[in-house]
Image (tube, grey):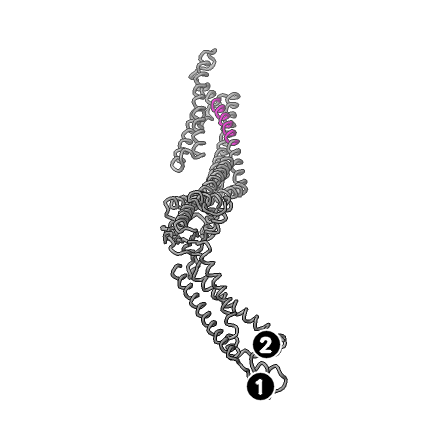
Amino acid sequence: MAEEFAEQGTPLDLERIQAIVRRRHVQFLVPLFACWLLIWCSSWVLPVRYKSSTTILVQQPTMPKNYVVPNINDDLQERLASIEQQILSRTRLMMIIDKLHLYAGSKRSLTPDDKVARMGRDIDVNLVRDPDSGEITAFKVSFSASNPYTAQQVTSELTNLFIDENSKVREQESENTTQFIENQLAMARTNLADQDAKVKAFQAAHEGSLPTQQASNLQILSGLQSQLQSEQDALNTASQQRVYAQSLIDQYSSNPGAARGTTGAPTGLAALDEQLDTLRAKLADLSTRYTDRYPEVQEVKSEIAKTQKQRDQMAADLKSRAAVNSAGDGQALPDSPQTASLLQLRSQLKASELEISNREQAIANLKSRINDYQGRLNDQPAVEQQLADLTRDYSQSKDNYDDLLKKESDSQMATSMEHLQEGERFAVLDPPSLPTKPDFPNRLKMCGAGLGAGLVLGALVVFGLEYFDDRMYGEKEIQNLLPVAVIAEVPQVVSPAEVLKSKKSLVLGWTLAGFVFCTILAGSAFSFLRN
């Protein structure tokens, strides 16, 4: 029958609902009241938990970032997660548990691990973000306990740990950054010193061939070439004087009278004096244009010293020969013009030979120096390339060192700022509150939840009873069930006993409804006042 009624699909109108309420009000009110009473009573049986909260404000650095740049991680959320992991570690939580004797009154003995796990569940950390920028501006720390004073004390301990740990973490990160930069700077300083030593060693090994010395090398080479030309001219002159002196000596030996009238040119000491005068004039001219360190000036001074030495030696030879002749057999007198002329010619010949030797040696030295300077100029492109490579490496090391030096200074300043607590720090905005009302259970909410659950349960019971009831209670149900129209109906005959029973049932229903309503209302009011 139930299936047949279900197939008919009798509409649920207002009249039928009223009929169902008259029939099933007791079946609806009893589950409603039982469910509400069970949940409401459980709210008074469950252990009470008090929750203390505090708000920690994230204060920005007092110094502007364009003056002092922080040298630590700027990701506050990541740092907070790290700090939270450290604070919620087993060691830190056990310190708080032992200090405040938490969970000591538990009905069953808890192991240290159980206490740590339970305390971790009682702690709650929530971030507060700026609705516009999304940046973290603060965070809330909460702790739940069975005693409000315990909850406040634990929240205060957690707050202090967050503030202290943040300062410690920032200082440690800043010091580590500074130490790392100092180590890198020491390595860069060593590398820079090595590069500087390589450049200096290369410059010392190629002294004279450096690019900066090209102009002086060209000037010195030009001077040496001029000196070489002068020396070659002087050598030619000395060679001519030697040939001339030798020819005079030969003529004098073969015909003394003929050689007597041919000595018109200055010879001997007179020639050396004339040469000295010429060299001194040249030195005076060079001194007006160059310093004493100029190579040509030094060469002229050397020539003057050599010529002066030759003159002194020639004068000494003339005196010694005159003494020897005076002690001889008297064939030639000391003051004889023939003897003096011959001695003078021989001295001139010897001086010419000595000058030729000196000139040849000077020319050889000049050629060697010219070859040296020409070699320097030829090697200059390769030296310049090698020096450019070394200088580039040195410049890179110098730039890296200067950059690290500036970073070290900035990092040290940032570390000093962290030590002085002038960086980003945590400050307590609201001190840990002393809860006056339990956070759990919320009896008023549980009262409302019990009422809702009772309504659902009562409706389900009524629906089940109606679904499985195959009786018909109205004319419309019979009409919907029969395939033909109803011609007549037999009215229901009600006895006085049945009328009395119906009245009693109605009074009982309203009484039960009033009792349930008043009880739920009183329980809700009591929960509200006590909560």
The amino acid sitting under disc 2 is Arg
The amino acid sitting under disc 1 is Glu
Figure quadrant of the N terminus? bottom right
In the depicted structure, whether residue 502 falls above or below residue 149: below
The magenta stretch spans residue 355: yes
In the depicted structure, whether residue 292 falls above or below residue 389: above
State yes or no: discs 2 and 1 in contact (Cβ < 8 Å): no
Q: Going 49% across and 76% down the picture, which residue do you hit?
A: 500
What secondary structure do most residues of the magenta stretch adopt?
helix
Q: Secondary structure at mark 2?
A: loop
The magenta stretch spans residue 326: no
Q: Quarter of the image holding residue 441?
A: bottom left
- The residue identified by callout 1 is 489
Magenta stretch in the rendered image: 346-364
What is the x, y in percent for residue 113? 51, 45
Q: Give the spatial CA distance, label 2 vs label 1.
A: 17 Å
Residue furthest to the bottom in view is 487
- The residue identified by callout 2 is 471
Residue 398 visible at all? no
Q: Which mark is residue 290?
A: none
